Amino acid sequence: MNRHGDYAPLASPRRSPPGDMVVMASTTPKEQQNPSQTDFVPLIDPLPDVADADTTAALLLAYPGTRDRHQLLANLGARMLDWEVPSATAKPTPTDERTAPAGYTYLGQFIAHDLSFAADRIPISKAGVPNAQVLDNMRETQLQLESIYGGGPREFPLGYVCPISPTVAGRRRTARTHLRLGAIHAVQPDMTLVKAGSDLPRLACPFLDSATAPVAGPGVIAQGATDVLIADPRNDDHALISQLTVLFCRLHNKIADSIVATAEAGAAGGDGAIDYYGLFERARKATTAIYRNVVWNDYLRRMLDQDIFERYAPRRNDIHRPVGFLTVPRPGRVAVEFSHAAFRFGHAMVRAKYRLGNIRHFELDAILELNSTEHPGLMPFDATWLADWFRFFDGNGTPPADFMYSRPLGPTVTPMGPDVVFLNDEAGGPPLLSLSVVKSGRTIPARGIATRDLVRSCSVPMASVDAVLATMAQDETMKAIIARHPLLADKRERTGRIARWLDAPGLFGVEKDVQFAEKDIKFLAANPPLFFFVLFEAEQVGHGIRLGPVGSFILAEMIFSKLAVPSPGGPPRGHSGHYADLLNLPPAVDQDLRRVFGANAPETMIDIVKSLAP
């Protein structure tokens, strides 16, 4: 996520509105919306026994008025931000070896960027009314590392190394095969840390701006690397996501080194000209094969409910086993239940501080602000900011005190960013008045990432929790999973647990974190926003370690469907696929991987880290 918390795929890929405000757009019924502005398919298709009104947006409209329902979300967001107060209905889960290592928080963000990209556009409709939603996914291929490759070296040459020296038999090479990286600042003399590393490629060229430097001379010095030369600017949102991007770029370059060297050795022996673009494609395919394997075999295996994972995951001893999907999102689209609700669970994993190298811990806000947009004068950063990925993905002999785990999953989120929430009028015009909340007896402006996520999850028509459960129950395996958990199988149990959490007393005799009116508790307990429920379920069912069945189902339907090859048939209202291509790599790709890694190509993030270690 960036400093404003943009984590999920269809969120704005760069920055929130000026002044760090989060504009609370009003929710509008489906029938009143412009079809051209809502052209996306929810994950859950309307079911025969579920009315169109059974959506988060429609349910929220049952509340008295615009201000009332937005105040309700602001109060819930304030309750979710009190992350030091344990839940009243579940035993607190400590941040220890039971939770996911801290690096998986940001691997999730990287995957989100690779699934979709919704570019900021000037929001003008035919009626001249600003369009409140940016819905088009510009990601042509999903889970194929398009977020680092872009359209390849022919379409986006700035992202690739430009060869400038002769290679084979004195011939000059111009085709680009390697991803471009940048240098880091040298460590200051009084620091003991001396560590090599790379940064994203950053550009600082004062000669480009004729308005401020009409005459370029030798005395003009660049002040910071103001622009980043990468395919997806969101991958420079903060210090951790930029370095994780560098990690995958280095993986590609390591594979490309081997492929190019082998080809050039053969050409030097008289094998003829070299197709360097073909060599780039080979390196891309090999790198992508590793990445796709990590997505399911490492990330989803850790984060999903185990029963849901087994329902969807590939089986190496049966590569042609069909897997049935219960939903059919349009090709290239990302379901709003995924983008605006379930996949935002990563915000609950964020720690308040991280130890990157060996010098000191960095506060979260400092990490989120380190990028070419917020602090161009500091770019590229120095070695004190370099992440020791062994500390994020595996101890590898590091003392346990230095290894970092993510925060346990639950309906509480680490405060981040200075967001202040404003109320919009029904027509989507400028903000009219600010909202405030009463938190622990103090009246403060409504702010924070939890409120922002709630607003987004309730700003588009998406399936309610009941509708998701109804869809899951169409599958016998899913139906059995639901039956094992009273929170899912019994609505009275579900509403009771949520009500107790909302009405939890303060600790040690202090005031409640947020006071909810009885009618508010009753409404939210019966109609929990999907984003909130995914986190609540992760605490109640997943014990803070992994997602519960509902959240896992939404992730599995979306991500596994992008990894599977479609096949005919499938369950009613859904489709079928198989993972033969995922598990049985083409011989050429397998050969390239074996040449670099032997018989043990990386299958997890720590495997990648180890393969790139000095």
Image (cartoon, rainbow, N blue to C red):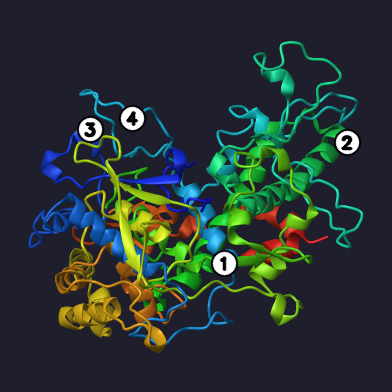
What distance separates the C-alpha of mark 1 from that of mark 4? 35 Å
Residues marked 2 and 4 touching at CB (< 8 Å) = no
**Identity, as a three-letter code, of the amino acid under mark 1:** Ala
Q: Position of residue 351 (x, y in %)?
A: 56, 68
Of residue 594 and residue 428, the one placed in the foreground of this image is 428
The answer to which of marks 3 and 1 sits earlier in the sequence is: 3
Front disc: 3 or 4: 4
Query: Is 247 left, or right, of 472 in this rendering?
Result: right
Give the quarter of the image for residue 606. Answer: bottom right
> Tag 2's secondary structure?
helix
Q: Residues within 10 Å of mark 4 (few under 14, many from 20)?
A: few
Front disc: 2 or 1: 1
Query: Is 192 left, or right, of 478 in this rendering?
Result: right
Q: Where is residue 571 in the image (x, y as percent from the top left)?
A: 23, 62
**Which label was assigned to residue 269?**
2
> Tag 4's secondary structure?
loop
Task: Residue at 58%, 81% (x, y): give it.
Answer: 96
**Identity, as a three-letter code, of the amino acid under mark 2:** Gly
Residue on which the image places disc 3? 36
Front disc: 3 or 1: 1
**Identity, as a three-letter code, of the amino acid under mark 4:** Pro
Q: Where is residue 550 in the image (x, y as percent from the top left)?
A: 31, 70
Q: How many marks?
A: 4
Residue on which the image places disc 4? 123
**Identity, as a three-letter code, of the amino acid under mark 3:** Ser
What distance separates the C-alpha of mark 3 from that of mark 1? 40 Å
What distance separates the C-alpha of mark 3 from that of mark 4? 12 Å
The answer to which of marks 1 and 4 sits earlier in the sequence is: 4
Q: In this rendering, does residue 323 appear at all? A: no
Which residue of the protein is positioned furthest toward the front in this rendering? Answer: 442
